[in-house]
Amino acid sequence: MVPVEAVFNPDNSPRNEPHVWVVAGKGDDLHLEDRKVSVGQVGTEGVAIVSGLTAGERVVTAGVNELHAGQPVRIWTRERGL
């Protein structure tokens, strides 16, 4: 299950081909991979991903339309009070 905001349709992709941005790499060498996924039910908790992701993979949940493949990223940790 991922937030609805994490799923997008790339500009160069046919309609109804959902994708997510997956954070790949290790340590300080993190980057984005564009991953095609199959989605299932949409509910109050988000969208069920039927295939294309492995449990534990990290996905981008905000700003997905402003990103590109290979882009370096860092993990944002929510601080207390935010």
Image (cartoon, helix red, strand yellow):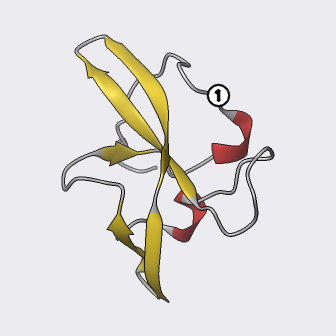
Q: Is residue 22 left or right of residue 28?
A: right
Q: Residue at x 40, y 81 (%)?
A: 45
Q: Quadrant of the N terminus?
A: bottom left
Q: Residue at x 23, y 53 (%)?
A: 54
Q: Residue furthest left?
A: 55
Q: Residue furthest top?
A: 29
- Indicate whether 1 appears above or below 27: below
Residue on which the image places disc 1: 68
Secondary structure category for the residue under label 1:
loop
- Indicate whether 20 appears above or below 25: below
- Indicate whether 39 appears above or below 77: below
Question: Is residue 27 or residue 70 the one in the foreground?
Answer: 70
Could you tell me the amino acid type at mark 1? His
Where does residue 69 sit, x and y in percent of width and height? 57, 26
Q: Is residue 38 left or right of residue 77?
A: right
Quarter of the image holding residue 48?
bottom left
